Amino acid sequence: MNRSSWWFRVTAVLVFSSASVSGIYAAGHKQTFTGEVGDAMCGRKHMEGETAADCTHACVAHGSKYALVVDDKIYALDTDDKAALATLDKQAGKNATVTGVLSGDTITVSSVVAK
């Protein structure tokens, strides 16, 4: 193997390793989102009950996850934290600020604050 070929391989390994590490870091980065608390099944089209809160409560009781509607995006909220779930329940149909890690269209929630 000549010297330039060796340097090419070393550079390629370093570039790909760096890209992999930065991708891992970006995937685990906490972000903050503010929007209306709803449910993942209905999104912004509430079909149960008289209000958005009624629909959200009914859908969550039937197994849907809470969701956060931010502009034209709907993010499913993933959490088992009882305090976060209690805040989401109180904020159904109202605005909240959610902090967590975004993966696709799901936010793994670390905290929820009423707005």
Image (cartoon, rainbow, N blue to C red):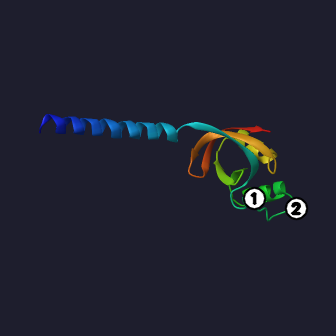
Q: Badge 1: how crowded within 10 Å, few (<14), some, or many (20+)? A: many
**x and y percentages locating residue 30 in the rendered image:** 59, 36
Q: Residue 113: give its label.
A: none
The residue depicted at 31 percent of the width and 35 percent of the height is 14
Q: Quadrant of the N terminus?
A: top left
Compare marks 1 and 2 and give the one earlier in the sequence. Answer: 1
- The residue that disc 1 covers is 44
The residue depicted at 52 percent of the width and 38 percent of the height is 28
Type of the residue with mark 1: Arg
Q: CA distance from mark 1 to mark 2?
A: 14 Å
Q: Is residue 21 above or below residue 49?
A: above
The residue depicted at 58 percent of the width and 45 percent of the height is 102
Residue at disc 1, secondary structure: loop
Q: Please indicate whether residue 47 sits to the left or right of residue 19 in the image.
A: right
Q: Please indicate whether residue 91 sits to the left or right of residue 104 in the image.
A: right
- The residue that disc 2 covers is 50
